[in-house]
Image: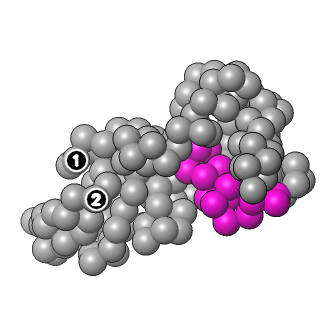
C-alpha cells in the first residue's frame, strides 16, 4: 500500500485538498488527477522543459517536484495562464511568427517565455536564447520562437 499525504494547494486559482501519493510527481498529479494535460511529460529528468509549470511565481520542472511539495503553494499551469489571458500576447506572437509546429514543447516554452518577459523586459536575443536553453524543441530550430518573444518585448518597450 502506497503512503499518501493530505495536501492542500491552489491550482490555477482554485484551492483543493487531496490525499496524494508521496512519490507522485507534480506533473503526473496535474495530468492524471486533475485532467490538466497541457504540461507534457518528456524526458522525466528535468532536461527538456515540457513539464514546466509555475509554483509560487517561479518556473519549475513538474517532473522533478513531488506533488506533496506543493502543499500550501500556488501552482499555475498552461491552462490557467492561458485562460487568464496572461499569455495572450505571447500566444499571438507564436502564432504570427509560426513559432509552434508539433506543439509538444509549446506549453513549457510559453511559460518560460512569460517568465522572461515579466522579469527581464530588456532581454536581448542572446538572453532570450539563454533563458530558453532548458526547453527543447525538435521542430522549429528556435529562430521563430526567439523572434516571437523579441516581438513581444519590443511591443512592450514601445508602450512605455
Q: Are marks 2 and 1 in contact (CB under 8 Å)?
A: no
Per the rendered image, the range of residues in magenta is 108-123
Q: Is residue 36 magenta?
A: no
Residue at the front extreme, as displayed: 160
Q: Residue at image x 43%, y 48%?
A: 81
Quarter holding the C terminus? bottom right
Q: Residue at image x 22%, y 58%?
A: 14
Q: Residue at image x 68%, y 23%?
A: 96
Residue 85, compared with residue 30, is above or below; it is above
Q: Position of residue 7 (x, y in %)?
A: 19, 72
Q: Position of residue 68 (x, y in %)?
A: 28, 72
From this viewpoint, is residue 98 visible? yes
**In this figure, which residue is indicated by the disc labeled 1?**
34
**In this figure, which residue is indicated by the disc labeled 2?**
13
Of 136 and 126, the residue lying toward us: 126
Mark 2 or mark 1: name the one nearer the start of the chain: 2
User: What main secondary structure does the magenta stretch of the protein show?
Assistant: helix
Element class at badge 1:
loop
Q: CA distance from mark 2 to mark 1?
A: 13 Å
Q: Is residue 30 rendered to the left or right of residue 89?
A: left
Element class at badge 2:
loop
Of 60 and 99, the residue lying toward us: 99
Assess disc 1: are there few (<14), some (14-19) or many (≥20) residues with their C-alpha within 10 Å of its C-alpha.
few
Assess disc 2: are there few (<14), some (14-19) or many (≥20) residues with their C-alpha within 10 Å of its C-alpha.
few
Q: Is residue 103 rendered to the left or right of residue 69?
A: right
How many badges with numbers are in the image?
2
From this viewpoint, is residue 139 visible? no
Front position among marks 2 and 1: 2
Q: Position of residue 111 (x, y in %)?
A: 55, 50
Q: Residue at image x 60%, y 52%?
A: 114
Residue 60, compared with residue 146, is above or below; it is below
Amino acid at each position: 500500500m502506497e503512503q499518501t499525504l493530505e495536501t492542500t494547494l491552489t491550482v490555477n486559482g482554485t484551492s483543493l485538498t487531496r490525499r496524494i501519493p508521496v512519490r507522485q510527481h507534480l506533473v503526473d498529479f496535474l495530468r492524471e488527477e486533475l485532467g490538466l494535460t497541457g504540461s507534457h511529460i518528456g524526458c522525466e529528468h528535468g532536461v527538456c522543459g515540457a513539464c514546466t509549470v509555475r509554483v509560487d511565481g517561479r518556473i519549475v520542472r513538474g517532473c522533478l517536484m513531488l506533488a506533496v511539495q506543493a502543499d500550501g503553494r500556488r501552482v499555475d499551469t498552461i491552462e490557467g495562464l492561458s485562460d487568464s489571458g496572461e499569455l495572450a500576447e505571447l500566444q499571438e506572437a507564436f502564432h504570427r511568427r509560426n513559432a509552434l509546429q508539433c506543439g509538444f514543447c509549446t506549453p513549457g516554452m510559453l511559460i518560460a517565455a512569460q517568465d522572461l518577459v515579466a522579469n527581464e523586459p530588456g532581454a536581448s536575443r542572446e538572453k532570450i536564447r539563454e533563458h530558453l536553453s532548458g526547453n527543447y524543441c525538435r521542430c522549429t530550430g528556435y529562430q521563430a520562437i526567439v523572434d516571437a518573444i523579441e516581438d513581444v518585448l519590443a511591443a512592450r518597450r514601445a508602450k512605455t
